[in-house]
Amino acid sequence: MSTTTRARYYLFKSEPDAYSLDDLEREGRTEWGGVRNYQARNLMREMHPGDLGFFYHSSTTPPGVVGICRVAASAHPDSTQFDRSSEYFDPASNPQRPRWECVDVEFVERLPRLVSLAEIKAQPALADMVLVQRGSRLSVQPVTPAQWRAIIALSRKAAPHG
């Protein structure tokens, strides 16, 4: 039995005017804080250093995958929940019983080109991706190895016209 574990894959959504791939590249590493969804929090609890993630720009035209980041630190209490000046402050959370956790991510690389949401939706092989499911607004999502490979391959092809 092998003791090595394979990296798992995720997608991290961020509005580029709030925090962009440029910001992550400049800073090198950041706490992926401010997530206030239990399902996304639970996904971060499962992450391990070395897991990879797509960096996805949302609420922009066009939205899409722009780069790759790596989980640099396992889940730990999200510091924004205790900061009264933060928009993510949670008065029900306290340091002895934190409600929210996050991971640290680090910049890996930019994709050769943006892979747009429309392009992802047009791929039958990506039809079961959480990103394209109706009503899915999770800011942190799982990605299968096959979905990972498909998006990497798309990023290396010329952008579709239309």
Image (tube, rainbow, N blue to C red):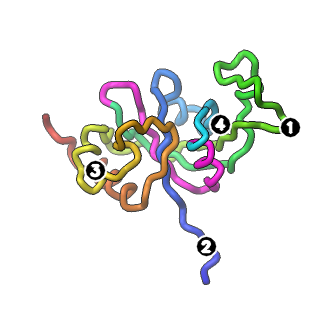
Mark closer to the observer (4, 1): 1
Find residue 50 and report its horizontal and vertical position in percent: 59, 56
Check disc 2 and report its element: helix, strand or loop. Answer: loop
Numbered range of the magenta stretch: 40-62
- The C terminus: image quadrant: top left
Q: Residues within 10 Å of mark 2 (few under 14, many from 20)?
A: few
The residue depicted at 35 percent of the width and 37 percent of the height is 64
User: Spatial distance from mark 3 to mark 1, Cα to Cα?
Assistant: 45 Å
**Is 128 left, or right, of 79 in this rendering?**
left
Q: Is residue 109 visible?
A: no
The residue depicted at 30 percent of the width and 38 percent of the height is 116
Q: Inspect the image, locate mark 3, and give the three-letter code of the amino acid beneath it.
A: Leu
Outermost residue toward the top in this view? 85
Please report contact status of discs 4 and 1: CB closer than 8 Å, yes or no.
no
- Nearer to the camera, 112 or 35: 35
User: Spatial distance from mark 2 to mark 4, Cα to Cα?
Assistant: 26 Å
The residue carrying mark 4 is 31
As drawn, the label of residue 4 is: 2
Mark closer to the observer (2, 1): 1
Mark 2 or mark 4: name the one nearer the start of the chain: 2
Mark 4 or mark 1: name the one nearer the start of the chain: 4
User: Spatial distance from mark 4 to mark 1, Cα to Cα?
Assistant: 20 Å
Mark 2 or mark 1: name the one nearer the start of the chain: 2
Q: Inspect the image, locate mark 2, and give the three-letter code of the amino acid beneath it.
A: Thr
As drawn, the label of residue 96 is: 1
